[in-house]
Image (tube, rainbow, N blue to C red):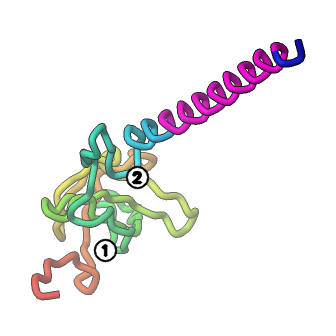
Amino acid sequence: MAKSKQKPDNLRRSLLVVLVVAVVYGVYLLDQYLKRTAVSSESEIVVDQGQRVPINIRTRGGIGTWESVGFVHTVATDDNTILSLRAREIDRGRYKYEYEVYNKDNGVTVQLFDGEEVDELEDGENIGTIEGYEGLGDFQVTIDKDQELKYLPYL
């Protein structure tokens, strides 16, 4: 009788081992599948069979840093308000920029053109009114010749 009790215990033990091995192998397979289909970095998605699909890769460098390029001043009023003009290059191949003005007196920064990408501003260009300074009329750009944005093909 002792021998017949051992068979069910051995059978239970064997089934338990098989079940544990199956669960561990299932977890391993799930981990491998998630690694193949997960985002491996900010710039690519890995799909089945190891194929890589690039997404949103900047091929011409990142967004530039804010640089002082000159100033803007009122055109028609006696107020003579002068604000520092800063720019940063957004798209190097198309020469698109973001502009902002900075009031040194109160430390307020205002984005021009609602933060949209625009072509490079030129010296003497009229940019219209600036948010927060509407009562002063139009503003005109003066580009600092030493800070002028330039294309240097040999650098």
Q: Which residue is mark 2?
A: 41
Q: Is residue 7 magenta?
A: yes
For image coordinates 11% across by 87% down, the residue present is 154
In the image, residue 59 above or below residue 116: below
In the image, residue 16 above or below residue 36: above
Q: Residue furthest left?
A: 153
The amino acid type, in three-letter code, at marker 2 is: Ser
**Horizontally, is 144 left or right of 155 in the view?**
right
For image coordinates 33% across by 67% down, the residue present is 64
Where is residue 155 shown, x and y percent of the image? Answer: 17, 87
Q: Quadrant of residue 32?
A: top left
Q: Which residues are magenta?
A: 4-30
* Disc 2 crowd, CA 10 A, few/some/many (<14, 14-19, 20+): few
Q: Main secondary structure of the magenta part?
A: helix
Check whether the beta carbons of the residues at disc 2 and disc 1 lie within 8 A of each other.
no
- Tell me the number on the disc at residue 69: 1
Instruction: Give the mark nearest the N terminus, 2 or 1.
Output: 2
In the image, residue 6 above or below residue 56: above
Q: Is residue 27 magenta?
A: yes
